[in-house]
Amino acid sequence: MPAEQTPDRFHGMSPATAENQEGPTFSAAMGARLSQMADADMKICAITAAMADGTGLETFRQAHPRRFYDVGIAEEHAVTFAAGLAASGMKPAVALYSTFLQRAYDNLIHDVSLQNLPVVCFVDRAGLNPGDGPTHAGVFDVAFLLQIPHFRVYTPITRQALYECMDEAFSCGQPVAIRYPNGREDAEVVQRFYADETPAPDHIRADDEGNTPDVVIVTHGRIVKEALLAKQTLEERGLSVRILLMEQIAPCAEAAERLVRRLPEKPCHIVFLEEEIKAGGFGMQLSAALRERSDFSGHSVQIIALENAFVMPAAGETIWDAAGLSAPFLVEKIQSQISKK
């Protein structure tokens, strides 16, 4: 039987009707790039917890078997082991699914952050995952990572952005988390935000730098697609909208400093949109950092995020509809808030 011959390939299967997108997944792109980086740097090594194939590290394992470590289903050990390697002068990369990284929360704090060690965590399956169910939804990592000192958190949503974040991660000399969804880059997102192929020095991409907007949607990750759809409807209803796509969300004070430079001087309505839990998340922490700044005033703020972490779509329902984060929901929430002003 095929499933018996290659059980790893049948561990998780997409529906037969799923669209056949082009290009490598973020996992495969990360694994290939990491292997290339390890060709040139003998200190780079890779660690995973029984997820070599799922996290894209199979390429690295084959190319650099002596610098690859699969510690089994022991995420806590994977992180502490990485800290030990970093303390010894190595450059460890730990690739784990977001939903399993939370098992190593204590290790991230005590073994990595407390010593400010340069461990790079690749947080796979970040955000809502349409095909995996609530057990594999990566909706908690932003809230707990943004609370840990020293950590830099990157949120690339294209392959080129992923590669740029990886280059920074291995040169900054401090703990890093790079989170990305289960899937491939979206052609429309590339076209709308990455027409200019040069790196964004502030790690913020805008879909429109034109007229002063009534609404600025600040977001990260795959949910930017719903933001684009919501923008179209809002503009049809007479509101001008700009979307700011963030590639780095921590440290929060640093992200806030970069963001405030991108906001219009004229007061507008700012919407923080995320596909992770609302409590303690991206919107709450970044808006709090903005309010502490003397150069941020007059803007109204709204946070749209997951109210219920466990999203279980009904038959025929999208993950975004079930989460209350699809474009029609976003339009009504934004317009409702604006009408109260």
Image: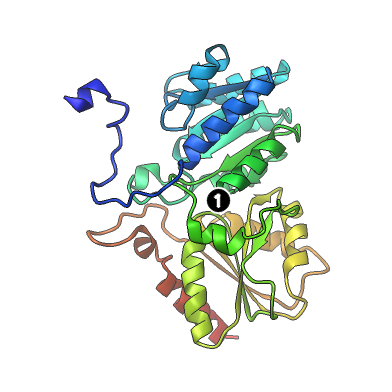
| Outermost residue to the right | 294
The residue positioned farthest toward the top in the image shown: 66
Q: Quadrant of residue 165?
A: top right
Residue 305 visible at all: no
Residue 232 position, x and y percent, is 49, 77
Q: Residue at x 23, y 46 (%)?
A: 16
Tell me which residue sits at (25%, 59%) in the image: 314
- Residue 12 sits in quarter: top left
Residue 329 visible in the picture: yes
Circle count: 1
Task: Determine whether 56 is above or below 82 in the image.
Answer: below
Residue extending farthest left: 1
The local crowd at label 1, few if under 14, some if 14 to 19, many if 20 or more residues have their Cα within 10 Å, is: many
Location of the N terminus by quadrant is: top left
Residue 39, x across and y down, in percent: 63, 21
Residue 311 horizontal side relative to residue 57, left or right: left
Horizontal and vertical percent position of residue 283: 60, 60
Q: At label 1, which amino acid type do we have?
A: Ile
Q: Which residue is mark 1?
A: 157
Quarter in which the C terminus is drawn? bottom right
Please name whichever residue, 187 or 220, is drawn nearer the observer in this view of the structure: 187
Question: Is disc 1 placed on a helix, strand or loop?
Answer: loop
How does the figure colour the protein chain or chains?
Answer: rainbow
In this rendering, position of residue 298 left or right of residue 8: right
Residue 81 position in % (x across, y down): 59, 19
Choose between 253 and 218: the one closer to the eye.
Answer: 218
Out of 177 and 193, give the one closest to the viewer.
Answer: 193
Residue at 29% x, 50% y: name it: 18
